[in-house]
Amino acid sequence: MQMRHFTLMSTAALMTATAGIAGGADEVTLRIGSKTAKAGQTITVPISMVTTELVGGFEFTLSAEGNNIPDINWDGPLFSNGWEGWDTSPNELVTVSAACIFTEDQVGPGDHLLINVPVEIPADAEVGSFVTVNASNTWFANYAFEIGTVIVIDGGVQIRGSADIEGNGIVGPEDLSALLAQWGTDGPADLDGDDTTDGKDLAMLLTLWGTDG
């Protein structure tokens, strides 16, 4: 049976072996998505890769301003056949590493979800603040094991207030009434933390309708 799981050691060896041909691959973009979450939640942030070539291997280190990353979800199309890379989660600084050498595991070049990254938001996170998720120490090789340049677009998590303004466990008509009553103020209905309850907060509340907020 073919082995589809690679450790950091094997990927590091690949990096060493290909370091002399840097610049042979096209540029790729590693794009970290942005989400909204309440303080105390664990929210999943998507990471995508835009490439014009098949992926031979990659590695990068993720951080979220010192917040814990409990796991890496290897659920992008590149990993749909059941193989995974390797990561150092759970940790505040997580190295993500993979090498793909089996043609049956490949997807065509394009803009593809790579992995999903859960981030634990502390209970005391301030409403309106933004937790940046970024990638450093990046590396990419194409299917010919030529090294390319990686452009990183950081993302993260916008901390919002609870849309369950009345605190009854579900977002509904009572919360909508409370938001309208607080229109133009900086009260609890200011879900995005910009000091004014307005249409952006209303849209957020309606998106969360029927949930626990």
Image (cartoon, grey):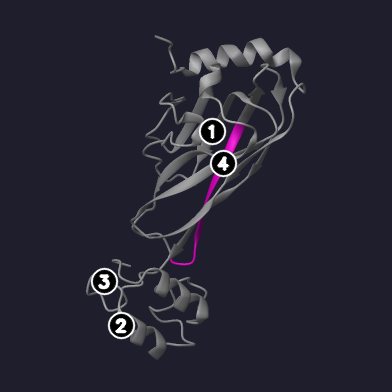
Residue at 39%, 69% in the rendered image: 161
Amino acid tagged 1: Thr
Instruction: Please rate how many residues cluster around mark 4, counting C-alpha atoms within 10 Å: few if below 14, some from 14 to 19, many from 20.
Output: some
- Report x, y in % for residue 65: 49, 47
Amino acid tagged 3: Ile
Left or right relative to 163: residue 151: right
Q: CA distance from mark 3 to mark 1?
A: 38 Å
Point out the residue furthest to the right here. 23
According to the picture, the residue beneath numbered tag 4 turns out to be 48
Q: Which residues are magenta?
A: 127-137
Circles 1 and 4: CB distance less than 8 Å? Answer: no
Marks 1 and 2, the one that precedes in the sequence = 1
Residue 199 shown in magenta: no
Amino acid tagged 2: Pro
Q: Nearer the viewer, residue 27 or 101?
A: 101
According to the picture, the residue beneath numbered tag 1 turns out to be 61
Which-is-in-front pick, marks 1 and 2? 2
According to the picture, the residue beneath numbered tag 2 turns out to be 173
Q: CA distance from mark 1 to mark 2?
A: 44 Å
Instruction: Please rate how many residues cluster around mark 1, counting C-alpha atoms within 10 Å: few if below 14, some from 14 to 19, many from 20.
Output: some
